[in-house]
Image: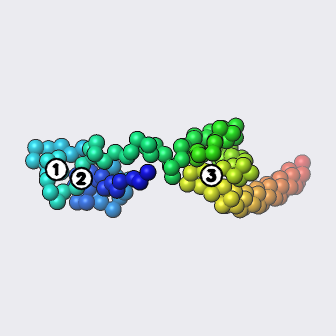
Amino acid sequence: MTEKKKPTFRRTNSTQYSKLGKKRKKKQVWRNPTGRHNKMRNQMKGHPATVSIGYSTDKVSRGKINEKVPVRIMNVKDLLKVGKNQIAVIGRIGKKNKIEIMKKAQEMKIEIHKTNPKNYLKRNEKKKVKEESKDKKESKKSESNKTKSEEESKKWT
């Protein structure tokens, strides 16, 4: 099914004031236009479109991602639920669990929404190497500090 082209629904006067979203995408959240003489509420020509029933997507393609049904994944066991015409959507989970899911998804060749498991794992391996090197440096520093403190304590006894 082909989807209809929808306008980007923006808040009234969002292009005029910074507090409503001028140059700030997060603030450009839709709010229904109110006000007695509001041109947008009255749907006057030349003013932005308002949200209405006519802009909804087809029932067949509603809620789908790339014409596939999304399946929410919270752990490795949930990957088994993903079928042929479905796409995995990772929930809000920690990095450790996410890495495990990515490894399993790469083995099973499962498509994950907005992420490439191969690239994700590659990026996090680099970070692990950096963290390990930092831990080694810190442990060396702590060992040298211990030996200095032991020498000083021997002097005083």
* Residues at discs 3 and 1 in contact (Cβ within 8 Å): no
Task: Determine whether the residue tagged by mark 3 lies in a helix, strand or loop.
Answer: loop
Q: Is residue 125 left or right of residue 56?
A: right
Vertical arrangement, residue 3 with respect to residue 78, above or below: below
Going from N to C along the chain, the mark reached first, 2 or 1, is 1
Q: Give the residue pinned by disc 1.
A: 43
* Residues at discs 2 and 1 in contact (Cβ within 8 Å): yes
Going from N to C along the chain, the mark reached first, 3 or 2, is 2
Relative depth, front residue between 36 and 127: 36
Amino acid at dot 2? Ala
Residue 17 lies in quadrant: bottom left
Going from N to C along the chain, the mark reached first, 3 or 1, is 1
Q: Residue at x 74, y 51 (%)?
A: 107
Q: Give the residue pinned by disc 3.
A: 111
Q: Give the residue pinned by disc 2.
A: 49
Q: Is residue 48 left or right of residue 107?
A: left
Amino acid at dot 3? Glu
Q: Residue at x 44, y 46 (%)?
A: 61
